[in-house]
Amino acid sequence: MIYGKEKQDNIIKKSHERSVYFGIEENRVFPKKILKGKEITNNIEKNKSFLKVASPFIDILYDFLKGSEFFIILTDKEGCILKIIGDKEVMDIANNLNMVVGAFMSENSIGTNAMGTAIKEDIPIQISEREHFIKAYHRWTCSAAPIHDINGDIIGCLNLTGDRDRVHSHTLGLVVAAVKSIENQINVDNTNKKLLETYQYMNTIVDSISSGIYVVDFRGKIKTINKAACNILGIEDKDVLDKNVENILPNWHHIFERIKNGKPYEDKEAVLNDKLIKGRYNVSATPIQIENKIIGMVIVFKEIKTVLDLVNKYSGMRAVYNFEDIIGESKEIKKVINYAKGISSSPSTVLIEGESGTGKELLAQSIHNYGDRRENSFIALNCGAIPKSLIESELFGYEDGAFTGARRGGHAGKFELANGGTLFLDEIGEMPLDMQVSLLRVLQEGYVTRVGGDKVIPVDVRIIAATNKDLKKEVEKGTFRQDLYYRLSVIPIKLPPIRERKGDLPILIKYFFRIKSIKLNKPMPHIKEDIYHNMLQYNWPGNIRELENFIENIVNLRGDSSFMLEEDFKNIEDKHNFHENNIGLLYSNKIRTLEEIEKEAIINTVNEYNRNMSQSAKALGITRATLYSKLKKYNI
């Protein structure tokens, strides 16, 4: 800018004083410092980005000034010339003065001049004739303005130089306007760079998310999609970008209209389609808004199975078994299942009594998953596996600092975690008497108080307890409270041992051989007929757990059908009290499958009872309906 004469004179005076201090002589012609060769190349490379932005504006300015005998100079922040352009006549004069690329136009190199002083004072300035320090520049009028980056720091200078007779205040205005354009472009480029960086960051983040994500515009066109979505759907991004989302999400119109009307769309179950895959997913949609107008939406989806697996993994609070997992067709087990289904949605407490290994927790989980609380937590606590000193804090939780070793911030107990769901108390007969009192109080009052705290926390929990003891006898012995027994046994369920449901043994044996063979990646064994008979006759005091472990042991150790195992398991006779001298597996031509043995057993029994189906079914330990089903299966 053109300053008042007094201010301009003051700026020039100080600059001249600096020039003297720097040892610049008035008769000097060339700049003191000029880069050569590789130094120039390195400096140009260092300022490449700056040059790239400024050069187009310099070229436009030169086109405007062509023929006016002006030349344009661009310097870096130290005053070193990066670019010089102008008409040939004036450029020849500039070259004779060594005003070339690599020359430093700073005050300490050539004294007072528009470029050096503009950079030093950080102001636009016009310097003409004798205002220059060296006499060689007295012929010039120079207008220069510093160029700043987005932080306000000087990164260079733009200068317009011409004959002193052509001095005009508008010349500086032209330079300032060009500098503003360059600075604006720097800001735009920086914004674009940040946007690109942000885009890259977002892309990386989105691609690292295991959920499928894609963005849809208001026309239903897919604008972006992450790697997880491509993997889940078995597609490549190039196959779906800018394509209609209807091929993947048939009801996208419904979702879009819903979020346009301000209604949330979160964690909904939906079916996604693709030519290669179709499945059930958990889907959420979030609107994309610009100036309060919804222009699209972000779809996030995850396979239903993955969602449930994630919940199970991190909470450990879900029941996984259902009534369908209870193997058996005997009237004894069917009676239990039907009864348990009938009380599944009741809020009343359940007491499951049964010997070890009968499947008490399996039944408890099945009750939970069949009832009204199936969407909520299933929390299990084995009262016999936790030290007596910890049962109270496990059940009711504790506050910060309640005892030495307590978790900082406190910890919720099983009752709180099970709120709205089911709390399964296994081996309830092992609970200490003092804790029985506390448990009874919670069952009666419906709230808990954490250890070390005084806050009353209401809980809505359904209790299912289980025991392998005779609690009535424990009450008589004084080791179990009578009032708690009655509170727990509102709905008593007795799980029969295997010896009382022998009709299920063939099914259980076949089931476990198949499951264990798959699990262990072993061939399904063929067993000797007399061994199979002994397995059916044995009482299995450890019940299903003993049977399962026994079969797993056989499959695990002897999955290779090339082995002859007549003697390998002879010690099991004593262990399981079998009546035969030998027990083992024999792989030979005389061995038959379980189905073959079962078929023969049915034929022999039916013939023995003269095809009396009721007596035959009773002898086999199965229902008449099951017998008829097997007769049809084996075409007997």
Image (cartoon, rainbow, N blue to C red):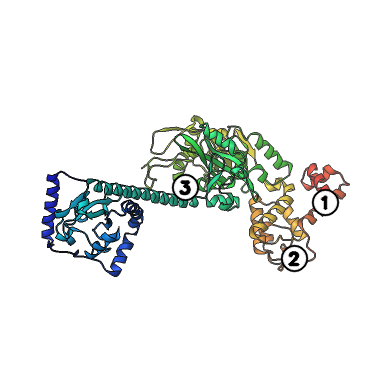
Note whether 343 is above or below 178 in the view shown: above
**Could you say which is closer to the camera, residue 508 or residue 254?**
254
Q: Is 507 on the left or on the right of 49, as rendered?
A: right
Image coordinates for residue 22, horizontal then vertical, percent: 13, 61
Q: Nearer the viewer, mark 3 or mark 1?
A: 1
Say what secondary structure mark 2 lies in: loop
Q: Amino acid at mark 1?
A: Tyr
Estimate the spatial distance between the alpha carbons at disc 1 and disc 2, rounded to whole Å. 24 Å
Q: Amino acid at mark 3?
A: Pro
Q: Is 165 on the left or on the right of 601, as rendered?
A: left
Q: Amino acid at mark 2?
A: Tyr
The crowd level at tag 3 (other Cα within 10 Å; few <14, some 14-19, many 20+) is few
Estimate the spatial distance between the alpha carbons at disc 3 and disc 1, rounded to whole Å. 54 Å
Q: Is 220 on the left or on the right of 73, as rendered?
A: right
Residue denoted by label 2: 587
Say what secondary structure mark 1 lies in: loop
Residue shown at the point (53%, 52%) measured from the top left: 227
Residue denoted by label 3: 387
The answer to which image quadrant residue 4 occupies is: top left
Residue denoted by label 1: 634
